[in-house]
Image (spheres, helix red, strand yellow):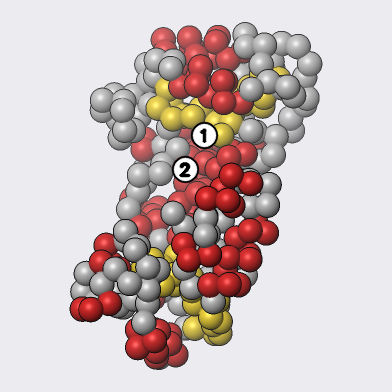
Amino acid sequence: MVALLAGMSILVGTPAAADPVSAAEVSASDEWEMTVFLCVPTTYGCHKRGATAKQKQALRTFLESSPELSDVRFVDRASAYESFRRDFAGNRTLLKAVRAKDLPESFRLRVKNGADPDRVRRAVYRRPGVGEVVDQTVLYGDTRPMAPKWDISIFLCVRDSATPACLSGRGQANGKIATLKEKKAVVKAIEGTSGVETYVFEDQATAYRNFVESYADNESLVNAIRMSDIPESYRLKMRSATDWNAVSRSLARLPGVSQVYNQRCVDAQTKLLAEYGRGDLPDSKVCAPRQ
């Protein structure tokens, strides 16, 4: 379960007309609570077809007439691509992999106070030509695989873990909590890895306490998780120029390691989905080292 476990005016009444916005306004913000991405041929569920002009106009009319929205803005492909290239200027691998035609056009929405965002999302998602609807408050509000101060987190196996890495390749330790021998091997690997500035070990009690504090407003989730469900971990601080992706792959292969989270990779994947509607790109493209 656990990855310990994302020039506008406020209008009242009829939403503003969905005029195209400049690249400077594309990035998600607190004011754009929801993004509606139109179909492109690569979007899952769009059957290799892009949204038609008729579908786009019908969606615009639907959104602008919605009593639950206070503001609607349209982002064209050129503006999205300009913003994309600015946001990922340091990732040449990703820039080469994504062309302007690969990015969907979108509508950025602000939901009125008192309106039900989930109902809005469901209603919009059913419209023809819509490929994805992203609720920014959900995506950015619950993506906490690790504390922000750490660049890479190595989660160890817990008892009865369903993670494939914990179930095979470990001999008699298969399906069991990480052994002392496995932990020593992880420490040796960390200390022998170039680019690691510092690291700490987070035991199960500390991890559980942090989990309870982080999700104090979700009583049902806290009650459902026991301390034994929470993995111990090693938290790494990396030098910026290091290839974090290569380090993550190497450490993930060690016996006793359940999962490895690379914060640079997680941040990039979240941004790609939330702001550009592309949550389908492989790690090898998204998580390339900074250049």
Relative image position of residue 48 (x, y in whole percent): 26, 28
Q: How many marks?
A: 2
SS of the residue under disc 1: strand
Disc 1 residue crowd, few under 14, some 14–19, many 20+, Cα 10 Å = some
Position of the C terminus, as image quadrant, is bottom left
Q: The residue under label 2 is which amino acid type?
A: Leu
Residue at figure coordinates x 78%, y 25% from the top left: 10
Quadrant of the rendered structure where residue 29 is?
A: top right
Relative to 141, is 1 above or below?
below
26 shown above or below 97: above
Q: What residue sits right under mark 2 in the picture? A: 273
On the image, the x and y values in percent for residue 68 come to 66, 16
Residue at (64, 22) in percent of width and height:
116
Q: Can you identify the residue that label 1 sits on?
A: 134
Secondary element under disc 2, as helix, strand or loop, is helix
Q: Residue 213's mark?
A: none
Q: Is residue 289 among the parts visible in the rendering?
A: no
Whether tag 2 and tag 1 are in contact, CB under 8 A, the answer is: yes
Tell me which residue sits at (43%, 26%) in the image. 38
Does 251 sit above or below residue 264?
below
Left or right: residue 210 versus residue 143 is right
What amino acid is at disc 1?
Val
- Distance between mark 2 and mark 1 Cα atoms: 8 Å
Observer-nearest of 246 and 116: 116
Q: Earlier in the sequence, mark 2 or mark 1?
A: 1
Instruction: Establish if 168 lies above or below 120.
Output: below
**Residue drawn at 35 percent across, 29 percent down:** 40
**Residue 190 sits in which quadrant?**
bottom left
